Image (cartoon, rainbow, N blue to C red):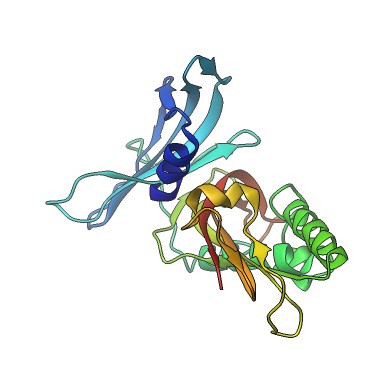
């Protein structure tokens, strides 16, 4: 969030204003802290006189202790409808253990398995359990194309999608699967091959508003990193030929620097 406010200030862009429609709440009955719940809600964004169409968004809120306030700890735009979330007899959503073995993937390895496909492409072994999509094989294709463009300039480009040490939220779906909400970092590096120094490499244009200074260049290389939030449907282990599918995502540049 700090990086995005800095980008808006640097470019003189109006801070977006958000309007929310009617939310649907999914609240697990938790007896200990942290407490958390999930909502889906249509969100309309306006910046100045421009207003974007409403998008359905999944959001996760958490309170870590009784004396703490509720905070927004996850927000991702739905690319397809949310699956039906299971509820108990009292109407509470049912939370899932991060190590639940009744699922195709234990929730605590969903992000890492997605990352294997993003890093290695559709031939990765992980592709056997991760569905093709814009945030899996599509993200790999985008990064590989960037790599090819930098190779044509005589530069080396590397990317790595990795987990973030922030809370993860897991809810049971009515088919016995789970909705898994989590955060990942996409770390990218552009540098001269062979770990040598060379002509200055500029930071990519969409990262200059958050670089310090914005005109920074690297004689060795530059780092340009993103933060992503995802929601993935993890099917039950008994589902025949099923794959985990990323159904929601949001991402933005969060770090740019030279070295």
Does any portion of residue 176 appear in the rendered image?
no
Position of 37 with respect to 151 (left or right) is left
State the residue at coordinates (43%, 57%).
Answer: 168
**In the figure, residue 110 lies in which quadrant?**
bottom right
State the residue at coordinates (78%, 70%).
Answer: 155
**Residue 174: image x %, image y %?**
54, 43
Position of 51 with respect to 161 (left or right) is left
Relative height, residue 232 to residue 23 (above, below): below
Residue that protrudes farthest toward the left in the picture: 67
Position of 90 with respect to 38 (left or right) is left
Residue that protrudes farthest toward the right in the picture: 152
State the residue at coordinates (70%, 84%).
Answer: 196
**Residue 4: image x %, image y %?**
45, 44
Position of 33 with respect to 220 (left or right) is left
Residue that protrudes farthest toward the top in the picture: 49
**Residue 18: image x %, image y %?**
42, 25
Relative height, residue 63 to residue 113 (above, below): above
State the residue at coordinates (41%, 48%).
Answer: 94
**In the figure, residue 136 lies in which quadrant?**
bottom right
**In the figure, residue 31 lies in which quadrant?**
bottom left
**Residue 132: image x %, image y %?**
78, 52
> 169 or 134, which is in the foreground?
134
Q: In which quarter of the image is the C terminus?
A: bottom right
Q: How many marks?
A: 0
Does any portion of residue 60 appear in the rendered image?
yes
> 60 or 94, which is in the foreground?
60
């Amino acid at each position: 969030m700090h990086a995005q406010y800095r980008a808006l200030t640097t470019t003189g862009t109006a801070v977006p204003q958000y309007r929310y429609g009617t939310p649907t709440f999914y609240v697990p009955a938790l007896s200990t802290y942290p407490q958390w719940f999930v909502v889906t809600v249509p969100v309309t964004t306006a910046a100045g006189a421009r207003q974007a169409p409403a998008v359905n968004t999944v959001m996760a809120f958490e309170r870590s202790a009784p004396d703490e306030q509720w905070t927004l700890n996850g927000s991702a735009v739905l690319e397809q409808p949310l699956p039906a979330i299971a509820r108990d007899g009292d109407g509470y959503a049912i939370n899932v253990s991060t190590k639940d073995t009744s699922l195709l993937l234990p929730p605590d390895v969903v992000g890492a398995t997605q990352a294997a496909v993003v890093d290695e492409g559709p031939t990765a072994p992980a592709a056997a359990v991760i569905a093709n999509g814009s945030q899996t094989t599509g993200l790999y294709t985008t990064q590989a194309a960037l790599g090819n463009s930098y190779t044509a300039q005589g530069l080396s480009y590397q990317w790595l999608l990795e987990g973030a040490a922030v809370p993860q939220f897991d809810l049971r779906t009515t088919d016995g699967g789970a909705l898994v909400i989590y955060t990942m970092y996409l770390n990218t590096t552009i540098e001269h091959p062979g770990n040598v120094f060379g002509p200055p490499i500029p930071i990519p244009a969409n990262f200059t508003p958050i670089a310090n200074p914005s005109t920074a260049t690297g004689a060795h290389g530059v780092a340009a990193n993103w933060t992503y939030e995802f929601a993935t449907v993890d099917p039950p282990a008994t589902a025949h030929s099923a794959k985990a599918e990323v159904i929601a995502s949001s991402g933005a540049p969060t770090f740019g620097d030279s070295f």
